Image (cartoon, grey):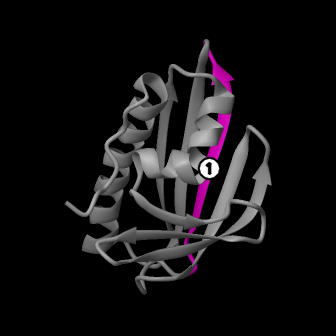
Amino acid sequence: MATIKHLFHIAAAQNKVFEAVTSIDGLKSWWTAQVSGSSDIGDVLAFRFKGSGMDFRVTSQTAGERVEWECISGFAEWIGTKITFALDQNEGKTRVRFEHSGWAATNDQYAAINFSWSRYMESLRQYCETGTGAPFTNS
Protein backbone atom coordinates (compact mmCIF):
# COMPACT_ATOMS: atom_id res chain seq x y z
CA MET A 1 0.00 0.00 0.00
CA ALA A 2 1.22 3.49 -0.86
CA THR A 3 1.09 6.62 1.26
CA ILE A 4 0.96 10.28 0.25
CA LYS A 5 2.92 12.37 2.76
CA HIS A 6 3.36 16.10 3.22
CA LEU A 7 5.40 17.79 5.93
CA PHE A 8 5.21 21.57 6.35
CA HIS A 9 5.01 24.36 8.92
CA ILE A 10 2.28 26.90 9.62
CA ALA A 11 2.93 30.18 11.42
CA ALA A 12 -0.16 29.84 13.61
CA ALA A 13 -1.01 28.36 16.98
CA GLN A 14 -1.35 24.59 17.09
CA ASN A 15 -4.91 24.78 18.44
CA LYS A 16 -5.90 27.01 15.50
CA VAL A 17 -4.52 24.47 13.01
CA PHE A 18 -6.24 21.63 14.85
CA GLU A 19 -9.55 23.52 14.68
CA ALA A 20 -9.02 24.02 10.93
CA VAL A 21 -8.65 20.27 10.34
CA THR A 22 -11.43 19.13 12.67
CA SER A 23 -14.27 21.66 12.59
CA ILE A 24 -16.84 21.90 9.81
CA ASP A 25 -16.25 25.65 9.42
CA GLY A 26 -12.49 25.12 9.36
CA LEU A 27 -12.64 22.37 6.74
CA LYS A 28 -14.96 24.48 4.59
CA SER A 29 -12.41 27.29 4.67
CA TRP A 30 -9.52 25.42 3.06
CA TRP A 31 -10.60 22.07 1.49
CA THR A 32 -14.11 22.16 0.04
CA ALA A 33 -17.02 24.49 0.75
CA GLN A 34 -19.33 21.46 0.83
CA VAL A 35 -18.61 19.71 4.13
CA SER A 36 -21.20 18.26 6.47
CA GLY A 37 -21.38 15.87 9.38
CA SER A 38 -19.54 15.79 12.68
CA SER A 39 -15.89 15.46 13.61
CA ASP A 40 -16.45 13.48 16.82
CA ILE A 41 -14.87 10.02 17.04
CA GLY A 42 -17.12 7.50 15.30
CA ASP A 43 -19.01 10.18 13.37
CA VAL A 44 -18.89 10.77 9.62
CA LEU A 45 -17.67 13.77 7.65
CA ALA A 46 -18.99 14.17 4.09
CA PHE A 47 -16.89 16.08 1.55
CA ARG A 48 -18.45 17.00 -1.80
CA PHE A 49 -16.98 18.33 -5.03
CA LYS A 50 -19.68 19.25 -7.58
CA GLY A 51 -22.05 16.69 -6.09
CA SER A 52 -19.68 13.73 -5.82
CA GLY A 53 -17.18 13.04 -3.10
CA MET A 54 -16.22 10.94 -0.13
CA ASP A 55 -17.42 10.13 3.38
CA PHE A 56 -14.89 9.62 6.17
CA ARG A 57 -15.43 8.09 9.60
CA VAL A 58 -13.43 9.81 12.34
CA THR A 59 -11.46 6.90 13.81
CA SER A 60 -9.24 8.62 16.35
CA GLN A 61 -8.50 12.03 17.74
CA THR A 62 -6.13 13.47 20.31
CA ALA A 63 -7.20 17.02 21.12
CA GLY A 64 -4.88 19.58 19.60
CA GLU A 65 -2.45 16.97 18.27
CA ARG A 66 -3.84 14.35 15.91
CA VAL A 67 -6.91 13.27 13.97
CA GLU A 68 -7.45 10.25 11.72
CA TRP A 69 -10.26 9.48 9.31
CA GLU A 70 -11.07 6.40 7.22
CA CYS A 71 -12.84 6.66 3.87
CA ILE A 72 -16.03 4.59 4.02
CA SER A 73 -17.72 5.62 0.78
CA GLY A 74 -17.06 7.55 -2.39
CA PHE A 75 -14.60 7.05 -5.19
CA ALA A 76 -13.55 3.38 -5.40
CA GLU A 77 -9.82 4.17 -5.13
CA TRP A 78 -10.41 6.11 -1.90
CA ILE A 79 -12.46 3.56 0.05
CA GLY A 80 -10.41 2.15 2.91
CA THR A 81 -7.74 4.85 2.68
CA LYS A 82 -6.91 6.83 5.81
CA ILE A 83 -6.12 10.50 6.31
CA THR A 84 -4.04 11.61 9.27
CA PHE A 85 -3.08 15.07 10.48
CA ALA A 86 -0.41 15.02 13.22
CA LEU A 87 0.54 18.37 14.74
CA ASP A 88 3.36 19.50 17.00
CA GLN A 89 5.44 22.57 17.73
CA ASN A 90 8.72 23.18 15.94
CA GLU A 91 10.74 26.39 16.13
CA GLY A 92 7.73 28.52 17.04
CA LYS A 93 5.47 27.16 14.31
CA THR A 94 3.00 24.32 14.03
CA ARG A 95 4.52 21.39 12.18
CA VAL A 96 1.96 19.43 10.16
CA ARG A 97 2.56 15.83 9.20
CA PHE A 98 -0.15 14.88 6.72
CA GLU A 99 -0.63 11.33 5.45
CA HIS A 100 -3.18 9.80 3.08
CA SER A 101 -2.41 6.10 3.35
CA GLY A 102 -3.73 2.84 1.98
CA TRP A 103 -3.52 3.48 -1.75
CA ALA A 104 -3.57 0.21 -3.68
CA ALA A 105 -1.46 1.55 -6.56
CA THR A 106 0.76 4.47 -7.47
CA ASN A 107 -1.03 5.09 -10.74
CA ASP A 108 -2.28 8.29 -12.42
CA GLN A 109 -5.12 8.64 -9.86
CA TYR A 110 -2.60 8.51 -7.01
CA ALA A 111 -0.40 11.11 -8.73
CA ALA A 112 -3.34 13.45 -9.34
CA ILE A 113 -4.51 13.18 -5.73
CA ASN A 114 -0.98 13.82 -4.46
CA PHE A 115 -0.84 16.98 -6.58
CA SER A 116 -4.25 18.10 -5.30
CA TRP A 117 -3.28 17.49 -1.68
CA SER A 118 -0.28 19.74 -2.15
CA ARG A 119 -2.59 22.51 -3.30
CA TYR A 120 -4.96 21.99 -0.37
CA MET A 121 -2.13 21.85 2.17
CA GLU A 122 -1.06 25.29 0.97
CA SER A 123 -4.71 26.40 1.26
CA LEU A 124 -4.70 25.13 4.86
CA ARG A 125 -1.53 27.10 5.57
CA GLN A 126 -2.97 30.27 4.05
CA TYR A 127 -6.24 29.89 5.96
CA CYS A 128 -4.46 29.45 9.30
CA GLU A 129 -1.99 32.27 8.70
CA THR A 130 -4.19 34.85 6.98
CA GLY A 131 -7.81 33.78 7.59
CA THR A 132 -8.38 33.15 3.88
CA GLY A 133 -7.91 29.75 2.25
CA ALA A 134 -8.65 28.58 -1.28
CA PRO A 135 -11.20 25.76 -0.87
CA PHE A 136 -12.89 24.00 -3.76
CA THR A 137 -16.14 25.72 -4.70
CA ASN A 138 -18.76 24.69 -7.21
CA SER A 139 -18.28 27.83 -9.25
Indicate whether 34 appears above or below 9. below
Q: Residue at x 34, y 49 (%)?
A: 135
Q: Residue at x 53, y 45 (%)?
A: 26
Q: Is residue 63 left or right of residue 117?
A: right
What type of secondary structure mainly makes up the magenta span?
A: strand
Which residue, given by chain and number where applicable, does mark 1 sit on?
23
Reply yes or no: does residue 87 show up in magenta. Answer: yes
Q: Could you say which is closer to the camera, residue 21 or residue 76?
A: 21
Q: Residue at x 66, y 28 (%)?
A: 14
Q: Quadrant of residue 108?
A: bottom left
What range of the chain is rendered magenta?
A: 80-91
At label 1, the amino acid type is: Ser
Indicate whether 9 appears above or below 45. above
Residue occupying the far top of the picture: 92
Q: Residue at x 78, y 64 (%)?
A: 41
Reply yes or no: does residue 52 show up in magenta. Answer: no
The x, y position of residue 88, in whole percent, is 68, 30
The x, y position of residue 125, in whole percent, is 43, 32
Q: Secondary structure at mark 1?
A: loop
Residue occupying the far left of the picture: 139
Q: Is residue 92 left or right of residue 49?
A: right
Q: Is residue 106 left or right of residue 26?
A: left
